[in-house]
Image (tube, grey):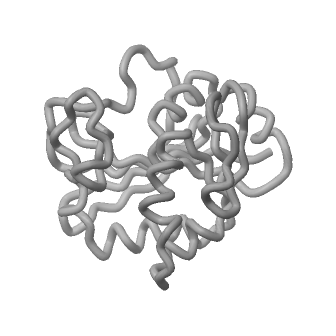
């Protein structure tokens, strides 16, 4: 059985929206896009690189997959993240997407996330990594399908924006299995479901 690992950047007040670019996600009038860039450093790069060292497939929600095509799918550089993202098998969970042909190595999982991902998880293959895709993470966590969280906890509050858990989340206990603090004050915390 595969494990599902979710990696999310989060502020102290729980916001996960629009980390990368000012125009990344402006839903709800969000004006703080691009808040995460100033916190990148060598420590964060090294820690994120460790995740790429293990064989894994990617799991995306429709919206994040579409955004990542723009950010990574059209790049042809030797950045290790570009190489990794383009080479990985990418499973896209969507009720509305007709195909996943827009980005190489993408496979469409049509239907309800909990059902399609539970079936994928139960089968053979590499572990599955989710980067972002907050709605997908919420729905899979509610069904007990997320095994591990890696949270990049950034030392700022935004006051507005989509939060990791909006509304109730099921009671779930996790064990802290490791943490690293970057030179910019980001705590990278690894949690495993008990």
Picture coordinates of residue 15, whole percent (x, y)? 27, 36
Relative height, residue 101 to residue 172 (above, below):
below
Say if 137 sits above or below 183 in the image: above
Q: Report x, y in % for residue 21.
A: 27, 55
Compared across the picture, whether 135 is left or right of 194 comes to left
Q: Is residue 116 above or below residue 2?
A: above
Residue drawn at point x = 74 percent, y = 57 percent: 126
Task: Give whichever of 97, 136 is nearer the camera.
Answer: 97
| Quarter holding residue 183 | bottom left
154 left or right, relative to 107? left
Q: Residue furthest bottom?
A: 78
Q: Residue at coordinates 32% horizontally, 40% vertically from top-left?
A: 16
User: For the N terminus, which image quadrant?
Assistant: top right
| Residue 132 figure quarter | top left
Between 139 and 70, the one nearer to me in the picture? 70
Instruction: Residue at the far top: name it.
Output: 168
Task: Kindly identify the residue that appears in the image at 26 percent across and 38 percent down.
Answer: 26
| Residue at far right of view | 124
So how many labels did they put on this image? 0
Quadrant that contains the C terminus: top right
Relative horizontal placement of residue 135, taking residue 3 as reference (left or right): left
**Residue at the (28%, 61%) spot, across then down:** 181
Which of the 4 image quarters holds residue 184? bottom left
List x then y, in percent, for residue 35: 20, 51
Task: Measuring from the top left, give residue 17's x and y in whole percent.
Answer: 31, 40
């Amino acid at each position: 059985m595969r494990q599902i690992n979710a990696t999310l950047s989060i502020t102290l007040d729980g916001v996960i929206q629009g980390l990368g670019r000012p125009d990344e996600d402006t839903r709800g009038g969000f004006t703080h896009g691009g808040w995460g860039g100033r916190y990148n450093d060598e420590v964060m790069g090294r820690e994120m690189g460790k995740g790429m060292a293990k064989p894994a497939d990617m799991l995306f929600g429709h919206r994040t997959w579409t955004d990542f095509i723009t950010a990574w799918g059209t790049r042809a550089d030797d950045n290790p993240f570009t190489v990794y993202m383009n080479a990985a098998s990418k499973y896209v969970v969507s009720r509305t997407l007709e195909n996943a042909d827009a980005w190489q190595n993408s496979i469409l999982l049509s239907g309800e996330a909990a059902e399609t991902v539970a079936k994928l998880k139960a089968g053979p293959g590499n572990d599955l990594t989710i980067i972002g895709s907050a709605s997908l993470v919420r729905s899979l966590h509610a069904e007990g399908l997320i095994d591990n969280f890696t949270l990049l906890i950034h030392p700022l509050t935004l006051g507005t924006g989509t939060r990791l858990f909006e509304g109730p989340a099921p009671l779930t206990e996790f064990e802290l299995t490791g943490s690293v603090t970057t030179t910019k004050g980001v705590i990278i915390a690894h949690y495993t479901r008990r």
